[in-house]
Image (spheres, grey):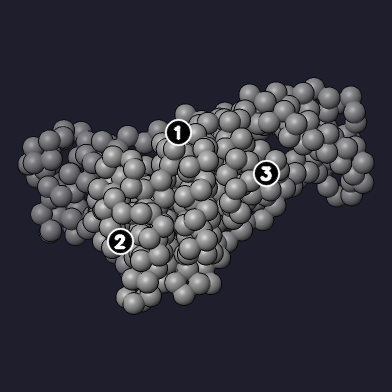
Amino acid sequence: MFETLGDRLQNALHKIKGYGKITEDNISDMMREIRLALLEADVNYKVVKEFTNTVKEKALGEEVASSINPGDMFVKIVKDELTELLGGESKPLNLDGDPAILMLVGLQGSGKTTTAGKLANYLRKKCGKKPLLVAGDVYRPAAIDQLKQLGKQLNIEVYEEGKNNPVEIAHNAIEYAKENNYDYVIIDTAGRLHVDEELMDELKNIRKEVNPQEILLVLDAMMGQDAINVITGFNDQLPLTGVILTKLDGDTRGGVALSVRHLTNVPIKFIGVSEKLDGLDSFDPERMAGRILGMGDIVSLVEKATDAIDEKEAEKTADKMMKGKFDLEDFLSTMKQIRKLGPLENLIKLIPGAKKMGLNNIKIDPKQMAHVEAIVLSMTPSERKHPEIIKASRKTRIAKGSGTSVQEVNKLLQQFDEMKKMMKQMSNGNFKMPF
């Protein structure tokens, strides 16, 4: 997501870091690189022109305090304008209804049905309340079955009436939700291959019938500039309250995200970040601007950890670490919790300064982690608690049991021993950074 754009912008901004003063001459080449980076990312040319003109104007007109490096000031201006371009501030969902009704609309193939499941899962996790999914797409073959399958995977009920009238289905679903104390109703509506009168009439009738708090357009980020026409087409007929951008984890340049709010005034509320059913994130313009410019997103990192990791288990493990009682049983438990956070390379990118440390392009082979897990699982409970008893014959047995080599077993034991020494130094206050 935005990786190519981020690299180009970061390289351009790196050049100004050493300048003692910002002048029209020394930023002209850099502004040209920023302009090209944005255009190549498929950002609308009008948006690019306005953005670069505003940044240049503010940079040249900014009174820089003597204590602030001019380069740092320029980077701040770019980040602030990028944040503004992305929408300024995050726009939370309106969930005031009883139940709150969220209506998903969009073209066929945008990922609407899957997004309905992801959104239900997100709301249940974040708000701890009860969502109901409604199968309102009665035209696309297997759309109802797809939503029912998602509901089964998530253990979330799906309301459906087969091929009945979508307006009646929506009405009946709301009545059902009220009778059964559901907090949120998420209606999956039918899509078309393009915006047409028949589609819009049906959506307008559903909206009139159920009066939803949110009308969210699900939009494929890989559409590029055509996405603006789709948003405009829907927004002319329906009062859109937000956009959910899907497939931002795919081969997309991301420019649509930088153009949407500025050209349509419809806020981005969520982004799809993976195909998994927990792969939906709320959209925060400031955090996203920080990610694009390589400043990391430590808040998102903490949120992911909070969602995935058992707090009591983490406290217990930390206590054992500090007391020097951390064993391979604890190591295995910690590793399993970390794996819940998703691919480690994606998490590393959220760390501020990851690129400077050479971590942004790191690839972690899941097979290697599986090997480590297999080695520990091949040990006896006694060996996990007291790895110092593992000698030659035990290492041979463990290697055979895990399908690995004695060298790999030795490597793991050595790394674990070094980690324990480091923990002991940290607990004694004697740890020194190795640089």
Residue appearing at x 92%, y 41% in the figure: 61
Image vertical order of residue 163 relative to residue 133, above or below: above
Give the SS element for disc 1: loop
Measured from the top left, where is residue 73 in percent x and y?
A: 80, 44
Asked if the residue under mark 2 is in contact with the one under mark 1, i.e. CB atoms within 8 Å, the reply is no
Question: Are there few (<14), some (14-19), or many (20+) residues within 10 Å of tag 1?
Answer: few
Give the SS element for disc 3: helix
Q: Nearer the viewer, residue 118 or 302?
A: 118
Residue underneath mark 2: 159
Foreground: disc 2 or disc 3: 2
**Marks 2/3: CA–CA distance:** 33 Å
Image vertical order of residue 1 relative to residue 122, above or below: above
Question: Are there few (<14), some (14-19), or many (20+) residues within 10 Å of tag 3?
Answer: few
Residue appearing at x 57%, y 37% in the figure: 230
Q: What is the quadrant of residue 155 in the picture?
A: bottom left
Image vertical order of residue 217 relative to residue 313, above or below: above
Q: Amino acid at mark 3?
A: Thr
Residue underneath mark 3: 264
Give the mark nearest the N terminus, 1 or 2: 2
Give the mark nearest the N terminus, 3 or 1: 1
Q: Amino acid at mark 1?
A: Leu
Q: Which mark is residue 231?
A: none
- Taking 88 as reference, is 430 left or right? left
Q: Amino acid at mark 2?
A: Tyr
- Taking 373 as reference, is 71 left or right? right
Residue appearing at x 33%, y 47% in the figure: 138
Image vertical order of residue 355 relative to residue 178, above or below: above
Give the mark nearest the N terminus, 2 or 3: 2
Residue underneath mark 1: 193
